[in-house]
Image (cartoon, grey):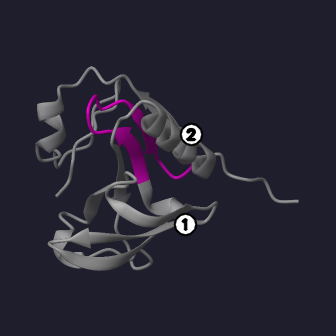
Amino acid sequence: MSELSTKPYLIRAIYDWCADSSLTPYLAVQVDEFTQVPKNFVKDGKIVLNISVDAVRNLHMGNEDITCSGRFGGVSHQIMVPISAVIGIFSKENGQGLVFQGQDSSPMLSSGTESNAGLHDEPPDDPAPQGKPKLRIVK
């Protein structure tokens, strides 16, 4: 029997926590050839998706992928994100959530101590320093 990954369960847990706390869940995604998102909204190979109930329709968070439909620039798009492409999931309002590091997708908790303004900054080109994870919206 193969071992199940904890990553999809942790993504769903943070999503549920956001919903229960009236927070907006954002999903950070590393776009690859298996990811179906509007390419003109991808920047530096990444995209951040608002996956709140108000922003998407028919959200399904399975063990292999996350699917939904959403509007970008007023146009409806079908979204498909493999679980392996998920970089992190966090709350828009306070930045708290999980960032998945490395090949084994080990989660790192985000304390939310970063300012919300930092969520809109460009990510650095050099590797992130060790310590607390920093979440940023990639547009």
Of 32 and 39, nearer the camera is 39
Q: Residue furthest right?
A: 1
Residue receiving disc 2: 13
Give the secondary structure at mark 1.
Answer: strand
Which of the two marks, 1 or 2, is nearer to us in this view?
A: 2
- Residue 74: x, y in percent? 17, 74
The answer to whether residue 109 is magenta is no
Query: Identity of the amino acid at label 2?
Result: Ala
Position above or below: 3 against 111: below
Residue at 17% in and 31% down: 116
Residue at 27% in and 61% down: 46
- Residue 30: x, y in percent? 35, 61
In the rendering, which numbered label is found on residue 23?
none
- Residue 99: x, y in percent? 42, 40
Q: Earlier in the sequence, mark 1 or mark 2?
A: 2
Bounds of the magenta segment: 87-105
Query: Identity of the amino acid at label 1?
Result: Asp
Quadrant of residue 71 in the image?
Answer: bottom left
The answer to whether residue 91 is magenta is yes
Residue at 48% in and 43% down: 15
Residue at 65% in and 45% down: 6
Residue receiving disc 1: 65
**Residue 126 located left or right of residue 63:** left
Q: For the residues marked 1 and 2, what is the alpha-carbon distance in whole angstroms?
A: 15 Å
Instruction: State which quarter of the image contains the C terminus.
Output: bottom left
Instruction: State which quarter of the image contains the N terminus.
Output: bottom right
